[in-house]
């Protein structure tokens, strides 16, 4: 029968959300952002539309247990390469009685470890199997066994809240069907699917950043909808800038980044540039789909900060800036390797957070709810006089926000550093053997120093590692991260 669920939002309590910075916006700036949001909704009326999913599916966080989904198969390029490698890390958002949906290869020893770290006894895992090649919500909609398990869970808990790594239309559709079939209210702790698609798109994000903050707030960028336009834009930008990057707009991180050196195209005919680009992109794994973003690669980059926000319902207050992190970026494509809490000059930190806050207000005015982060680069002669270019919006949970939330929920009085390394050839280990090998540095009894494995996959198959290092000082966490990384890679520690 229908449950009368309190519609108050419990996200702050669930994730221990709190503002680390307190940026502000003037009344005039708020009016401008509200007006910009109105124009964007007029351009795309489906941007924040959720009514078609029914009145019993609500944006927010309910009182009942959570269904946590870490699957990322709906992200182009990253999904089928490592979509199954990131799922267990979402479990660090879980509380007693929550359900974690796992699509990839399961690891019972990691599940026991994760329960122990979280000090939980009733954490459940729904395992869909390693052969799942569509998104987890889409699979659960079609698979009778998986759907039956979820509907039983919703009935048992008199409702549920979906906490998904990436909130999509399929997430809303699954929640809608569950609400209709069980007659219990289902919440979604994420944005409308249409807005999620747009915010995660680098071209859409660049457009709204320019409209909200000015053309100087992003690197020069063009949109190529076909091969001829791509060639023309590369030739034009290459005359002015030494390095360009072609981006698949709706991929994540560096997965869809293809670096082009201008010197390789200067003096060539359009036909020759076309051959060069086609060969270069094919070599880098481009799926041959348009549009592509053609962007100038900033020179004199000093650091790559990431601003982590939680965007509540408008009636519950402004977006909250929970932290600023400096990303560790490696390789010519700018791959994410890890992150640590930022140590920026006060004036730079204030301006960075002020701009991110305004972008958060814009998204909130558009109907956004949930976790969000904005990636930027600081460039210039030195950090004190640096300028900001906003690169992308991560309208989802991620490699920084999940560990950050875990630390906040743990009440750990510690600094921390996140390491996320892929593409390695380190020795394969059973996860239970890794726990024995690294017993001397594991975070278990002492909650303020040690490492926390975020995923078992890289350890199991020898392709990388994801872990969190905590310590009393930032330098201590960096040393601990380096030592752990070297031990995982079987390197001699100097």
Image (cartoon, rainbow, N blue to C red):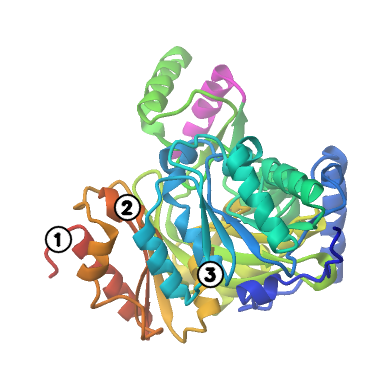
Q: Mark 3 falls on what kind of element?
A: loop
User: Which residue is located at x 64 percent, y 44 percent?
Assistant: 147
Q: Tell me which numbered mark, 2 or 1, is placed earlier along the sequence.
A: 2
Q: CB under 8 Å between callouts 2 and 1?
A: no
* Depicted 20 relative to depicted 334: above or below: below
Task: Classify 10 Å Cα crowding around label 1: few (below 14), some (14-19), many (20 and above).
Answer: few
Q: Is residue 472 magenta?
A: no
The x, y position of residue 456, in whole percent, is 35, 57
Distance of label 1 from label 3 (alpha carbons): 38 Å
| Foreground: disc 1 or disc 3 | 3
Mark sitting on residue 169: none
Badge 1 is on which residue? 491
**In which quadrant of the rendered image does the C terminus lie?**
bottom left
Badge 2 is on which residue? 458
| Foreground: disc 3 or disc 2 | 3
Q: Mark 1 falls on what kind of element?
A: loop
Badge 3 is on which residue? 122
**Residue closest to the eye, 100 or 338:** 100
> Dividing the picture into quarters, in which one does residue 442 lie?
bottom left
User: Which residue is located at x 45 percent, y 12 percent?
Assistant: 271
Q: Tell me which numbered mark, 3 or 2, is placed earlier along the sequence.
A: 3
* Magenta span: 225-245
């Amino acid at each position: 029968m229908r449950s009368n669920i309190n519609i108050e939002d419990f996200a702050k309590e669930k994730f221990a959300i709190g503002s680390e910075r307190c940026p502000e916006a003037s009344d005039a700036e708020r009016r401008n952002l509200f007006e910009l949001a109105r124009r964007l909704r007029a351009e795309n009326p489906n941007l924040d539309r959720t009514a078609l999913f029914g009145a019993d599916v609500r944006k927010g966080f309910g009182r009942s247990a959570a269904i946590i989904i870490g699957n990322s198969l709906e992200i182009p390029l990253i999904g089928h390469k490592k979509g199954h490698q990131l799922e267990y890390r979402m479990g660090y958002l879980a509380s007693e009685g929550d359900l974690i949906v796992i699509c990839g290869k399961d690891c019972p020893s990691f599940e026991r470890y994760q329960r122990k770290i979280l000090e939980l006894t009733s954490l459940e895992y729904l395992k869909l199997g390693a052969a799942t090649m569509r998104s987890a919500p889409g699979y659960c909609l079609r698979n009778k066994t998986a759907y039956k398990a979820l509907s039983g869970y919703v009935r048992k808990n008199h409702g549920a809240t979906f906490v998904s790594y990436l909130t999509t239309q399929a997430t809303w559709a699954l929640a809608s069907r569950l609400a209709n079939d069980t007659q219990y209210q289902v919440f979604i702790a994420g944005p409308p699917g249409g807005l999620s698609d747009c915010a995660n798109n680098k071209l859409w994000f660049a457009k709204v950043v320019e409209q909200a903050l000015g053309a100087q707030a992003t690197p020069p960028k063009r949109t190529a909808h076909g091969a001829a336009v791509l060639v023309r834009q590369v030739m034009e930008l290459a005359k002015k800038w030494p390095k360009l990057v072609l981006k698949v707009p709706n991929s994540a991180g560096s997965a869809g980044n293809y670096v082009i050196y201008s010197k390789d195209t200067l003096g060539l005919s359009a036909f020759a540039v076309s051959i060069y680009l086609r060969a270069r992109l094919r070599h880098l794994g481009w799926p041959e789909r348009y549009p592509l973003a053609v962007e100038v690669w900033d020179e004199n980059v000093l650091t790559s900060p990431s601003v982590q926000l939680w965007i509540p319902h408008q009636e519950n207050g402004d977006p909250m800036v929970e932290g600023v992190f400096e990303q560790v970026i490696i390789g010519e494509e700018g791959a994410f390797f890890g992150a640590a809490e930022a140590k920026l000059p006060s004036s730079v930190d204030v301006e960075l957070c002020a701009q991110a806050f305004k972008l958060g207000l814009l998204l909130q005015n558009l109907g956004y709810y949930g976790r969000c982060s904005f990636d930027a680069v600081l460039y210039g002669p030195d950090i004190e006089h640096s300028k900001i270019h906003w690169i992308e919006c991560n309208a989802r949970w991620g490699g920084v926000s999940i560990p950050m939330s875990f630390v906040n929920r743990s009440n750990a009085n510690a600094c921390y550093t996140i390491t996320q390394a892929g593409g390695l050839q380190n020795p394969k280990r059973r996860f239970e053997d890794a726990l024995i090998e690294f017993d001397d540095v594991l975070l278990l009894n002492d909650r303020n120093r040690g490492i926390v494995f975020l995923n078992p996959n890289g350890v199991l198959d020898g392709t990388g590692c994801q872990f969190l290092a905590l310590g009393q000082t930032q330098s201590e966490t960096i040393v601990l991260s380096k030592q752990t990384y070297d031990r995982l890679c079987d390197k001699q520690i100097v």
